[in-house]
Image (cartoon, rainbow, N blue to C red):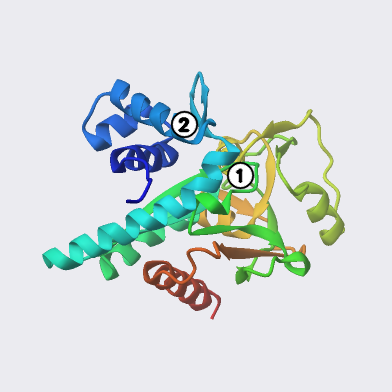
Amino acid sequence: MRDLPHLTYLQAFEASARHLSFTRVSEELNCTQAAISQRIRGLEQYFGRPLFHRKPNGLELSSAGAAYLPGITQALDVMDAATRGLTGRRVKQTVTVSAPISFLNRCLAPLLPEFTAAHPEIGLRLNSSIWTDPNLDLADLNIGFGEAKLLPDNAIRLAPAPVVRVAVAGSRKPAQRRLEVQGKFPLWELWSEAAGETFEAEFPPCRVDTADTALHLAVQGLGHAVVYEAYALAAAGQVAGSLPVDIGHVLLLQLNPARQTHSATRVFVDWLSTRFLSEQS
């Protein structure tokens, strides 16, 4: 007999890792928050270590939980496929995509109706990130921006990623203020060096944590932002920009090695790669 935790404990763990909220898990599994909490505690007692860190605003996977999750997710997917296959129901797979929140909102979301119409049997789970590098253990693939010369081995180039300096479109005069997106790359400095231009500011900068916020502020005339051209194109008509400047960055896709052979993941990757190639042609 296999010495395994009860299946309900594993379901509660996998759902808690996805939602990072006992409230949302209880809604999904149709049981009380107390029951979910009890199942997670039972699993933690089984291992003798915490799988989550409890925080005021939700849950966070511990290192043990993050290590345990990929195998449990894969096992539940296999069980789901086997069960649906035996009952004759159409197997539904889910692709988990991690990407910067600005990319999800402005670039990926408008394309997804096309994908879901072509592949209604594939579900999507979208995880947004802001500053930190996403944990591929929690996703099938990650979409982001990076330096072309420093791409990891599991990366696929989707498109070049030049930057532009943008401000509110039309006759309204924007403030001479830098709207700075804090993050991994100093885009203002990279733009200035590559373009050979300087920006004479009249006001202290306004620092934000996403390109999406910077674009919203630019539309209000609060200043100028340097963003990837893909974001500026998504805001066409609201902002006007300088000519694109190559800073050696690309839009890239990274595959989770443990999930890259899954059929639904391959379908999504092939579709997205084709979609971006068609936009460049």
1 or 2: tag closer to the N-terminus: 2
Mark 1 → mark 2, Cα distance in angstroms: 39 Å
Report x, y in % for residue 33.
Answer: 31, 23
Q: Do the CB atoms of the residues marked 1 and 2 lie less than 8 Å apart?
A: no
Q: Can I make out residue 141 in this image?
A: yes
Report x, y in % for residue 227.
Answer: 66, 51
Left or right of 125 on screen, residue 217: right
Report x, y in % for residue 71.
Answer: 46, 54
The residue positioned 54% from the left and 52% from the top of the image is 137
Tell me if residue 3 comes above or below residue 41 in the rendering: below
- What is the quadrant of the C terminus in the image? bottom right
Q: Front-most of 145 and 191?
A: 145
Q: Can I make out residue 101 in this image?
A: no
Residue where numbered disc 1 is placed: 211
Q: Front-most of 18 and 211?
A: 18
> What is the crowding at mark 1: few (fewer than 14 residues within 10 Å), some, or many (at least 20)?
many
Identify the amino acid type marked 2: Glu
> What is the crowding at mark 2: few (fewer than 14 residues within 10 Å), some, or many (at least 20)?
some
The residue positioned 12% from the left and 64% from the top of the image is 87
Q: Which residue lies furthest to the bottom in this view?
A: 281
The residue positioned 56% from the left and 58% from the top of the image is 143
Residue where numbered disc 2 is placed: 44
Helix, strand or loop at mark 2: helix
